[in-house]
Structures are given as C-alpha cells and as structure tokens.
Image: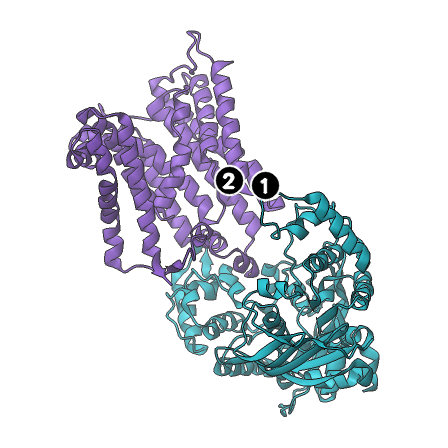
Chain colours: A cyan, B purple
C-alpha cells in the first residue's frame, strides 16, 4: 500500500523544550500519503508532543513543518484543521446530550441559521463513503465508546481532513471495537487519507501499520517500513538504553507475605482492567511492576490499597484475607501504602503534625479527644528522623514534593509495615529526593518488608527490584528475576508479546 | 467552599493566589469592609435625603447605646448563632447543607405542637423534652438528603434546598388548615409562659436560648478542633480523597455531620418558638434564619467562634437597619440595602484575607 507520491506531512528538525526538559530533540518525521504511520515509544518519549505540534497545540522552538511540500505555520488547531489535519485524542470532546450530527457541525456554523437537514445528509454521505457506520440522529450519550470515537473521526472528515492523528486510539476500546477501528482505518487510507497512529502496542503496529517511527527520550531512534522490522527489534529500540543492574546486597528471601490469587477488576462497561492477576511477594523482596502507563498498574495498586473493590479473586497478607478490606483495616494490618498521587496521601490544608498522625489517629486519641502532646512528639520525632524540612505546625501543602513524600514515607514506614505498596514513589521528584526514597525502600527490604514497587521508570525498577513483573492490558505478561529481565524481553512483554519474549 | 472561590481563578489575567494575609490586614479587614460599604451606599442615602454619617451611626452604634438595645442585639443573634453553627458542622466536612431553613421549621413545628400539648407539665421536664424533640425533628428532616448523598452521591445542595420549600409550604398548609386558629389566624396557640425559655434580664426580651447558643459554640469549637471526630470531619472537608486514602470512614462521618447539622438547625427552631416567638405563625415563616445561617457561617470563616462574632454583627446591623429607617424617616428598604452591602463587602474582603489578587 505504498504510494511514493508527495509526502502528506514533513516535519523537519522539530525541537520543543519545556523549561529544561527537551521533549522533542531534532525530530524528522515524514508521513507518506495513503499510509498508516505508527509513532511508537514509551511514556515521555515525545510522541504526544510531536503530534500536538502538528495539530497546532504547541509551537515548536525550532524546525519546520511542510504539508504537501508547502511550509506552514500552525498557530492553533484552527490552522491545522484548515489545512486538513485532524486529531482524535483519548478524551473525546463531544457533548453527550447532543446528537451525532449536532456534535459534528458544532462550532462550524457561523451564521444564525442551522441547516440540519443538509448537514445530516452530508454526514450520511461521508459515513457511507468511508464505511463508518453511525446513525447521525443518535444521541452521543447513548453510544458506546468505540462509536463515540467514530464520531470524532467523522468530525475530522467532515472538516475535510486529509491527515488523521490518532492518539493511542485503542487504549479505550474493547478488542472487538479495536478490530472495527482497524478495518475502518484501512478504508480511510484506501481513499487517500494518511494516518498517524500513536501507540505503544507492538502487535498493533506490526499488524496494521505501514511505517513505524520509534521515539525514545525525544529523539527518533528508527524510521522503517513495518515489513522490514520485527517485534523484537522494535521492543529493543523502544526501551533500549544503557542499563547496568547494580549489584545489590543479597537478601535471603523469607516467607510469602502478599499472595494475590486470580484478581480481576472490571469497569462499568465490562472492560477488564485487571485480568486474573497472580502474584506472590516474599519478605525481604522488592517486586517491581513495569509496563506502559494505563495497563492496569494503577488499578492493581488501588485494589491492593483498598481504594477499589476487586470484581473477583482474592489476596492475603500474612495469611489474612484482606480482599476488599477498607483503607483503615489495611493500615491496621501492617500494609504501608504510598499513593500514586502523593497529594492524595496528605490533606494539604492541615498541618504536618496532623498529617503524620491522621492515618493512625486511634493511637493519638484518648476517649475521642486528640492527644496534642503525642501528636506533637510524634511529629518532632519523625521530622528529625526523616529529615523533613518543615515545622510541625506548617501547612503540609506548602512543602516541596520531596518533603511531602517524606511525610508519607515517615507516617508509613515508621510503623514497620510487613507489606509496602509503593506506587510511583519518585515521580516528579528531583535526584536527591529520589535517592532518598530509594534508600528508605532498600532499608525496608533489609528489615524484611515485602515491597511492591509500581513505576513507569524502568531504570528505577531494575535498580531496586529483585523480581520484575510486566503488565499489559491488565494482565501479568511475565514474572522474571531481575537478572533475566533483559531490555528486549521487557520491551516485548510491555508491548504485549508473551511468546516472543519467552524465546528471547 | 474552596471550589466556589477557585472558580474565580484566571479571569482575563486576573487570578487569586491562595496566600494568607499578614495579621494587621486581618484586623483591618472588617473596618475596610465597612468603609467600602459606606462609600458604596452613601449616594443612595443622600438621594433619600439623609446624612450618610448619621445613617451609619444609627446602623452600627446607636443600637448599642442603650441596655435594652444591646440586649436586643443578643435576642436577634440567638437564632443566628444556632443556625450558623448548624451550617458550620456540615460545611466543615464539605457537606453543603443548604437546608437549615427547612430543618429549622421542622424543629419549630415540633416545639409549637409539644409546647401546647405539654401544658401543665413541670417546665424542668417539658422544656428539655421539647428541645430534644426539635433537635430530633431537624435531624429527621436532614436524613433523606444525607442518605442520598453518602450512598448515591446525589448532590446535597439540590436536595436540601428543595426540601426547604416542601417544609415551608407544608407548615403553611398546616397553619391555614388543621392548626388554624379559631379566630381565622394562621397561627398556633401561644405557649404558656411556664413552658417558654426563661427570661434572662427582664424587661428585655432576651431568653435562655442565647445560653444554648454560646454553650454549643464552645462545644463545637472543642469538637472540631480537639476531637478525633472533628479532625476527621475537617480532613474530609479539606481533602476527601486523601481522607479516604488514610482510612477515614467518610460515609459514617459525613452522615453524622449532616444529621448533627440538621439537629442543631431543628434545635434553633425549637428554641426560637420556646423563646422569642412563643408560637408558630405565618410571620415566623418569613424569618429565613436557616438561610441567614449560611451567611453567618461563611462570614465567620467556618470557625465556631467566628460564627458567634458573625451572628452578633449581623444581629447588630439588622437591628441598626430598623433604627436607621425609623430615626431618619427613610424607607426601611434603604436600611436593608445598606445592611446587604455591608455583608457583601465583608464577605468580599474576607476572601482577600486568604487570597491575593494578582494580575498576569
């Protein structure tokens, strides 16, 4: 399906900086007409930034964009749309109480009159031409997610788009809906449209795209026809970096502490967010959970933390069944929880001292009355011990991210928990604070705690973990000792290719 | 009410930054607000043919110049403290109970009924039972919205607000129907003096209701600031997600707070019937103390002692507005306008004690 005609889009030497962060570093990207071109990469590789630049949402600091060989300046999405570029994001911009047709013509009509009949007729015509089955008079509210996505695509086509950007379109879809989407995309490109397909799923790229550009750390690692590459190669290109697994103190692993059995979680639509997760963590062991964001890691830590109820399955901590126990019982049972969003771990408008006491308030209460002395003493002790830069009376929200994380660590770890659930414990922290968190987690491992470490930072996982578990689409794709966790294997597992990883 | 104010963020480059003002600003704020209100309303006062300075004298100072006048401010403040505290309990937990109005009348109905029915019983037995009945009636009227909120996440602002109309129209129907006075008046019989709250300083109209208010104010300060329940409630109000993460039982705590809020509003209604009013009448239904409670709680910065201060201040300007129109012969509406302007400037300047207005 290669049409070697004029490139539909050419992006030359695109550089985009956010402060000191370089999101796109001299990226060259060419989209040929009538092709599906995948942008593949981990979180933070620069895929979204590049597509937002093409859609006029960001302006590049350097570089040039050419559409059908004409240099263009895209100051806003309106410019991009006018030149025939459309984008469908994961979060749809649809009005649920409007019909499909109303949503599609919304924002287009400048006059006072609204020729619905004509618009509906044109929508029907476009839908028929591109094989997109939808009822223009249906209320968007009543549509399934896959159909809503179809409305977004129709919206772009109605605005005469020739280049369609799809940002992780299958992330929100059921497998059946994904199949339908790919069939529709085939029809679109046959009609001469060009598609930029952002993804981290290797299988989708291999099966449905013509070209693939792999991004890593804001740079292009490779651009190649899909026919000339393999999942293994793409995986290595996507994840690949110099990684040296640091030697760690050997630690005799103890008894099993956390035992997860067939844990599943369904959302309201019946999509499996977690599917038969089985996992055991022993005392004195750190198990890292790797995976591209949105593949069930958050749900796993939320279910284990008592924030979400499992749909089926169970888990035990030291042989006590804690499935669907509430947060208070978790804390009492020796489960130390570090939340993914650290602002969820503190009440910002309360003082540091109260935040250090709140999770175990019963210990600071006499007959329902707060023991101010004990709260203050506890705060002074923990502030000194964990080097928190704050006074007990300071409002917690005035602290830096690192110090807020120290409050949570101090509150949790000072209780000597048997199990620690650490979700993204260093996200957004500077180097010093990150080191601090790592040291505390290692200390706890030496002490004999079982630790579940969920992180999007592969380096962090490889640095701290004894075992690595890779999640993809709510399932555990692999469970490897860290010595066997090669880049290639991790990449394949993160991309959802279990068999290939077994042979790698 | 954090989300209400956050909505103001970033209008044409203007934005609020959350930053507590220095101490001297906090002290000066009420005076700045009064000055501002004075400037805003003096044009109107002049148009009505009165002297603005004189008008503000009658509004803010004259009511305090006599003993009876000062006590009359306390009379007015009694229901305001109670409904203000009722609103405070709920708002502290982020449960926006707008239904103190209806809960107030639930308590008032209970008191008006039992006050007559218990005629002849010893006051020491009857009065506590009647007050307790008002307390429970208020809680009962708050129960539905509270259950809907904690179990089905139905917005409490809507349900509590709507129930106010149900209660007020229901009471109105009661007063013009089964409870109608034989003479055709829409009112219940006067409760015998023995069963009413004792007068504290005759001949003033001040009754013991104010003591209930002050005791509750101190009690609520203690509960909110010195007990585990109060801390949990405030944690829920300030950060519901974090509170839940830390194992606080949000459902149970909010349910308790919502019911206590309704109960205090009901108690306010009962105390007003056994106190100043003596009976439930169609005029009682126009008092609107439940809504004023929201203003009192907000003006008081959602603290117990703040509620006390705000209730006194609002009582002062309410009485002052009356003395202003009487003394200067201007329409009573003018007093109401001045009073409303003061409240607005006060609330607006209180915002500035916690926020700085920044441009770009």
How much space separates mark 1 and mark 2, taking CA atoms? 10 Å
Q: Secondary structure at mark 1?
A: helix
User: The C terminus of chain B appears in which quarter of the rendering?
Assistant: bottom left
Q: Residue at x 53, y 33 (%)?
A: B162
Name the mark on residue B147: 1
Q: Secondary structure at mark 2?
A: helix
Q: Please provide percent x and percent y for residue B67.
A: 17, 30
Q: Residue at x 69, y 79 (%)?
A: A30
Q: Please provide percent x and percent y for residue A244.
A: 64, 92
Q: Chain of mark 1?
A: B
Farthest residue, direction top: B183
What residue would you read off at disc 2? B259
Q: Please provide percent x and percent y for residue A345.
A: 53, 65
Q: Residues within 10 Å of mark 2 (few under 14, many from 20)?
A: many
For the question of whether residue A489 can be seen, the reply is no
B207 lies left or right of B49: right
The foreground one among A26 and A11 is A11
B63 lies left or right of A290: left
Q: Chain of mark 2?
A: B
Q: Quadrant of residue A24?
A: bottom right
Determine if marks 1 and 2 fall on one subunit: yes
């Amino acid at each position: 399906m290669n049409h070697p005609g004029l490139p539909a889009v050419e992006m030359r030497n695109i550089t985009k900086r956010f402060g000191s962060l370089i999101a796109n570093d001299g990226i060259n990207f060419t989209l040929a007409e009538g092709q599906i071109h995948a942008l593949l990469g981990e979180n933070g590789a620069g895929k979204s930034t590049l597509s937002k630049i093409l859609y006029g949402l960001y302006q590049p600091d350097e570089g040039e964009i050419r559409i059908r060989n004409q240099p263009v300046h895209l100051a806003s999405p309106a410019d991009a749309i006018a030149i025939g570029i459309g984008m469908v994001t994961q979060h749809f911009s649809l009005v649920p109480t409007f019909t499909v047709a109303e949503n599609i013509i919304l924002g287009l009509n400048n006059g006072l009159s609204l020729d619905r009949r004509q618009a509906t007729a044109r929508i029907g015509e476009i839908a028929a031409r591109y094989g997109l089955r939808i009822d223009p008079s249906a209320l968007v509210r009543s549509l399934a997610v896959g159909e809503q996505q179809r409305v977004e695509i129709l919206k772009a086509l109605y605005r005469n788009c020739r280049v369609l950007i799809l940002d992780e379109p299958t992330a929100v879809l059921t497998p059946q809906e994904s199949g339908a989407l790919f069939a529709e995309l085939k029809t679109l490109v046959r009609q001469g449209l060009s598609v930029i397909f952002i993804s981290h799923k290797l299988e989708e790229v291999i099966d449905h795209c013509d070209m693939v550009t792999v991004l890593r750390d804001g740079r292009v690692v490779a651009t190649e026809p899909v026919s000339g590459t393999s999942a293994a190669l793409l995986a290595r290109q996507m994840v690949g970096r110099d990684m040296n697994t640091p030697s760690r103190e050997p630690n005799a692993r103890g008894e099993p502490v956390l035992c997860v059995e067939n844990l599943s979680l369904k959302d309201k639509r019946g999509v499996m967010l977690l599917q038969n997760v089985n996992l055991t963590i022993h005392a004195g062991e750190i198990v890292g959970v790797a995976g591209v964001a949105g593949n069930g890691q958050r749900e796993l830590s939320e279910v284990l933390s008592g924030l979400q109820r499992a749909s089926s399955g169970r888990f035990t901590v030291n042989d006590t069944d804690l499935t669907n126990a509430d947060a208070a019982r978790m804390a009492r049972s020796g489960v130390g929880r570090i939340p993914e969003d650290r602002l969820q771990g503190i009440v910002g408008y309360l003082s540091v001292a109260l935040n250090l006491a709140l999770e175990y308030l019963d210990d600071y209460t006499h007959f329902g009355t707060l023991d101010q002395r004990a709260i203050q003493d506890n705060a002074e002790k923990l502030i000194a011990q964990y080097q928190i830069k704050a006074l007990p009376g300071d409002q917690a929200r005035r602290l830096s991210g690192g110090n807020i994380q120290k409050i949570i660590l101090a509150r949790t770890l000072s209780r000597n928990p048997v199990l620690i659930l650490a979700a993204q414990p260093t996200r957004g922290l500077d180097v010093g604070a990150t080191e601090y968190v790592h040291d505390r987690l290692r200390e706890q491992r030496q002490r004999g705690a079982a630790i579940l470490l969920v992180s999007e930072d592969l380096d962090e996982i490889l640095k701290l973990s004894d075992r690595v578990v890779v999640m993809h689409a709510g399932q555990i794709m692999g469970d490897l000792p860290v010595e066997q966790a090669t880049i290639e294997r991790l990449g394949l597992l993160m991309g959802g290719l279990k068999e290939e990883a077994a042979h790698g | 009410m954090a989300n209400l104010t956050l909505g103001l963020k970033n209008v044409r480059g203007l934005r609020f930054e959350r930053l507590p003002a220095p101490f001297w600003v906090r002290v000066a704020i009420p005076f700045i607000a009064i000055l501002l209100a004075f400037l805003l309303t003096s044009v109107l006062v002049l148009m009505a043919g009165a002297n603005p300075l004189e008008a503000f004298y009658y509004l803010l100072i004259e009511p305090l110049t006599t003993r009876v006048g000062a006590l009359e401010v306390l009379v007015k403040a009694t229901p305001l403290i109670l409904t203000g505290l009722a609103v405070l309990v709920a708002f502290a937990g982020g449960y926006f109970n707008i239904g103190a109005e209806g809960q107030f009348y639930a308590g008032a109905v209970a008191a008006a009924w039992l006050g007559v029915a218990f005629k002849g019983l010893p006051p020491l037995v009857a009065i506590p039972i009647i007050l307790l009945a008002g307390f429970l009636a208020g809680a009962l009227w708050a129960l539905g919205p509270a259950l809907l909120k904690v179990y089905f996440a139905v917005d409490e602002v809507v349900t509590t607000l709507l129930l106010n109309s149900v209660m007020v129209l229901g009471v109105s129907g009661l007063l013009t129907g089964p409870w109608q006075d034989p003479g055709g008046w829409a009112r219940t019989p006067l409760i015998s003096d023995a069963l009413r709250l004792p007068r504290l300083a005759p001949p003033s109209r001040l009754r013991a209701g104010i003591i209930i208010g002050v005791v509750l104010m101190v009690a609520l300060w203690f509960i909110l600031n010195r007990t585990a329940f109060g801390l949990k409630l405030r944690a829920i109000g300030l950060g519901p997600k974090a509170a839940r993460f830390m194992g606080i039982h949000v459902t149970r705590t909010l349910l308790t707070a919502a019911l206590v809020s309704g109960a205090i509003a009901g108690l306010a209604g009962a105390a007003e019937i056994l106190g100043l009013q003596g009976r439930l009448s169609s005029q009682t239904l126009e008092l609107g103390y439940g809504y004023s409670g929201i203003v009192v709680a907000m003006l008081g910065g959602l603290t117990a002692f703040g509620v006390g201060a705000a209730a006194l201040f609002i009582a002062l300007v309410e009485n002052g507005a009356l003395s202003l129109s009487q003394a200067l012969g201007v329409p009573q509406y003018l007093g109401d306008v001045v009073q409303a302007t003061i409240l607005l400037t006060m609330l607006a300047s209180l915002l500035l004690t916690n926020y700085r207005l920044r441009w770009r």
